[in-house]
């Protein structure tokens, strides 16, 4: 692929992480493995570094970024962490939960991180490579999923290079992302009320899921594989690439044993395979709407919605 960068592929060992930290400290862009998906990281306190993320992804400027922190002290310097938010963080951090909180005026974050909102989305990741990087850089890292805007999220370094080669400084290859699906996003207000803005690996089932206004990135069409997609398919039509689940075996199968956690881990790899396949359309077997199945179906519905 062409672009102004000669994108380096780094191994996620001590040397690779040190090199990635130097690039990030200097304001560069590095795709980094997390337990959910690969994120395109840049220091969140630099206007120019954050502007680089939007440019590399072709991301609309109204869509804010998640800021990744190393510890609670860093989180409290960036946002007002209410007791309700502290309780959620204590239960689920480090891990695949993002909290949307009131942003502190003296947070020292690039303005573009919040895209004009007075809130900031914070996550303390569990993946050791991402944790070491935040520590080595000594600054919070902004990181959206490391894909071109609107396209399928990456769970392998090859997926990242497929859409961002030549547009970023480096990718840190840490193998496959263990959870495979983006974090659950919860907005917590000063009065302690909370809403799920995006379902994800952490099932907060009883919490209400709110509309799209507060999560500007939750557009109806997203994760687009670039061809028509049919959900709840029990039969293959001629010309379909079938994504199977449970008893329905496909060209790619999310989980032959019907395990929803395994299906989440494999979802984006199967969507990438379906996008590359010669078949003109994609059919997906029914996925139970329970636990992480809700988040899988949320992503599948967006992938099946044609761009406006
Ligand atoms: O697991 C994840 O969350 C991954 C890894 C890399 O951490 N990141 C990720 O980022 O999925 P992204 O940019 O693809 O999705 C972030 C979502 C977007 O829908 C965005 O609109 C929403 O978070 N968001 C960010 N800041 C927000 C804010 N202040 N208020 C409401 N929504 C926000
Ligand atoms: Mg994304």
Image: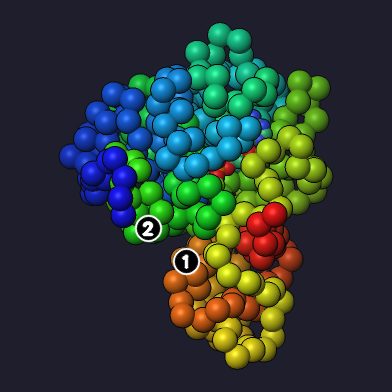
Query: Which residue is rendered at x = 67% and y = 62% of the image?
Result: 306
Please give left or right for residue 193 compared with residue 166 in the image: right
Q: Residue 258 at x, y = what percent?
A: 60, 76
Q: Residue 231 at x, y = what percent?
A: 69, 73
- Quadrant hosting residue 99: top right
Secondary structure under tag 2 reads helix
Query: Which residue is rendered at x = 51% and y = 81% of the image?
Result: 279
In the foreground, 168 or 72: 168
> Do the numbered discs 1 and 2 sit on residues whose CB atoms are within 8 Å?
yes
Label 1 crowd bin: few (<14), some (14–19), many (20+), radius 10 Å: many
Please give left or right for residue 120 compared with residue 133 in the image: right
Q: Quadrant of the C terminus?
A: bottom right
Label 2 crowd bin: few (<14), some (14–19), many (20+), radius 10 Å: some
| Residue 55 appearing in the image | yes
Answer above or below: position of 99 versus 164: above
- Quadrant hosting residue 158: bottom left
Please give left or right for residue 96 compared with residue 57 in the image: right
| Residue 293 appearing in the image | no
Residue 162 is marked as 2
Q: Quadrant of the N terminus?
A: bottom left
Q: Residue 219 at x, y = what percent?
A: 69, 48
Answer above or below: position of 18 versus 268: above
Q: Residue furthest top?
A: 106
Query: How is the rendered protein coloured?
Result: rainbow
Q: Residue 211 at x, y = what percent?
A: 80, 43
Secondary structure under tag 1 reads helix
Query: Which residue is rendered at x = 63% and y = 72% of the image?
Result: 228
The residue tagged 1 is 272
Query: Which residue is rendered at x = 50% and y = 13% of the image?
Result: 108
Q: CA distance from mark 1 to mark 2?
A: 10 Å
In the foreground, 122 or 152: 152
């Amino acid at each position: 692929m062409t672009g102004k960068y000669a994108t380096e592929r780094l191994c996620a060992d001590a040397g690779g992480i040190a090199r990635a930290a130097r690039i990030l400290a200097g304001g560069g862009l590095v795709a980094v493995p997390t337990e959910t998906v690969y994120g395109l990281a840049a220091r969140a306190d630099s206007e120019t570094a954050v502007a680089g993320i939007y440019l590399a992804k072709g991301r609309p400027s109204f869509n804010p970024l998640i800021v990744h922190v190393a510890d609670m002290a860093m989180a409290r310097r960036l946002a007002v962490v209410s007791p309700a938010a502290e309780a959620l963080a204590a239960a689920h951090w480090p891990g695949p939960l993002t909290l949307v909180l009131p942003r502190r005026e003296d947070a020292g974050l690039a303005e573009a991180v919040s895209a004009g909102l007075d809130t900031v989305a914070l996550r303390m990741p569990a993946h050791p490579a991402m944790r070491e990087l935040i520590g080595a850089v000594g600054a919070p890292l902004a990181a959206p999923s490391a894909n071109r805007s609107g396209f399928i999220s990456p769970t392998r370094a090859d997926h990242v290079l497929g859409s961002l080669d030549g547009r970023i400084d480096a990718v840190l290859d840490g193998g496959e992302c263990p959870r495979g699906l983006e974090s659950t996003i919860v907005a917590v207000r000063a009065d302690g009320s909370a809403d799920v803005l995006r379902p994800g690996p952490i099932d907060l089932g009883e919490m209400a899921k709110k509309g799209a206004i507060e999560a500007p990135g939750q557009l109806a069409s997203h994760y687009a594989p670039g061809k028509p997609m049919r959900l709840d398919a029990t039969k293959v039509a001629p010309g379909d690439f079938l994504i199977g689940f449970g008893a329905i075996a496909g060209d790619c199968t999310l989980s032959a044993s019907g395990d929803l956690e395994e299906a989440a881990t494999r979802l984006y790899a199967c969507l990438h395979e379906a996008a590359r396949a010669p078949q003109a359309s994609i059919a997906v077997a029914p996925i139970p709407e329970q636990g992480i199945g809700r988040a899988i179906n949320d992503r599948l519905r967006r992938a099946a919605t044609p761009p406006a």
